[in-house]
Image (spheres, grey):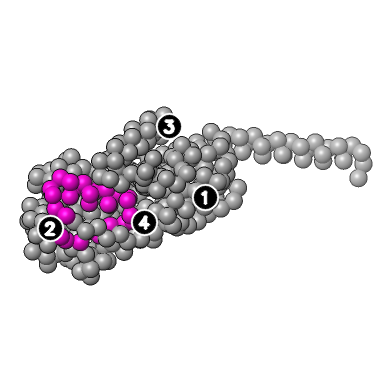
Amino acid sequence: MTLRSTRRSVLMGMAACAAAGTAQAQRGWEPMRPVQFIVPAGTGGGADQMARVIQGIISKHGLMKQPMVVVNKAGGAGAEGFLEAKGARGNPHMLVITLSNLFTTPLATGVPFNWKDLTPVTMMALDEFALWVKADSPWRSVPEFIAAAKEQKLKLGGTGSKQEDQIIASAISRATGAPLTYIPFRGGGEVAVQLVGGHVDATVNNPIEAVTHWRSGALRPLCVFDGKRLPDTGKMTETMAWSDIPTCREQGLDVDYLMLRGIFMPAGVKPEQVAFYEGLMARVRETPEWKELMQQGAFNTTTLTGEAFRDWLTREEDRHRSIMQETGLLAPQ
């Protein structure tokens, strides 16, 4: 090979590399290896179900070149997952799907973690809660259930200790004087199964965690813990839609609670890396599979990013601190 041809080959190689770099810059940052998707909760619950739907959507529609791997880290009411993400500073190949244990776990346990130890990406939705009983139970309204609870000290099952479900259980007791016995389980799926099996008398599961059992005729919703009725009017059973379930307030129980379903990254990541996942999740939300999940699970489809999301997180942390102090679930300071 002559000197001239050698120089030509080198220059062509440099040009090709430059073109590839330009194309990459135009596309923006993309993951270079599999993305670990941490679920700080047990399998079968709402967060786990949502994470796996997101994983399936990304794979089915080819929204990301690298695979996404869902990993459940439920230990310590989710502290295991949060602390791992906190220790992964600067790692753009890790995501965390959060529920409101983002606030409740550090407030209840004193574990050295705060949502500011992560990078907020996007709020995917807000999740509802409903008061569920067995379909063959004698209670068909909230007043009937509360009256029975005052006489029998009924058992109410929920996910985790000093978490969202127990906050609601404590709030019910404070509002009504009914001394409910709270029974914690590892995940929302297990909670629903325990109710179907008659091992607890009621639950405050998310709709997505109990909808299958409702549709099968095993469970009955008494009310939803929202200030207004759920909007979806499509029939979920032969006779009822989500919109047919009354609010708890309509039946004299003044307790409301909505739960976060959000996506976070470790701290110290670059803006272009956050932007990639913001865009990815925006594309996820446009798919028919996501819209079906939102309908099946009766989700509030509010979404936020950027400063608006950070402002919401700040307000929610303050609200949870106040609620947990009122219900006696706040860790000693």
Q: Position of residue 307 (x, y in %)?
A: 41, 29
Tell me the residue at 66%/39% (across/down): 20
Q: Earlier in the sequence, mark 3 or mark 2?
A: 2
Residue identified by numbered label 2: 149
Crowd tier of the residue under label 2, counting other residues whose Cα lies within 10 Å: few below 14, some 14–19, many 20 or above: many
Confirm whether the magenta stretch covers residue 160: yes
Circle 3 residue? 306
Question: Is residue 23 shown left or right of residue 237?
Answer: right
Of badges 3 and 2, the one in the foreground is 2
Q: Determine whether the residue tagged by mark 2 lies in a helix, strand or loop.
A: helix
Q: Mark 1 and mark 2: span between their CA atoms?
A: 40 Å
Q: Is residue 184 in sight in this rendering?
A: yes
Is residue 278 at least partly visible in the picture?
no
Q: Residue furthest right?
A: 2
Residue at image position (27%, 48%) is 167
Q: Which residue is mark 4?
A: 49
Residue 241 image position (x, y, % from top left): 16, 52
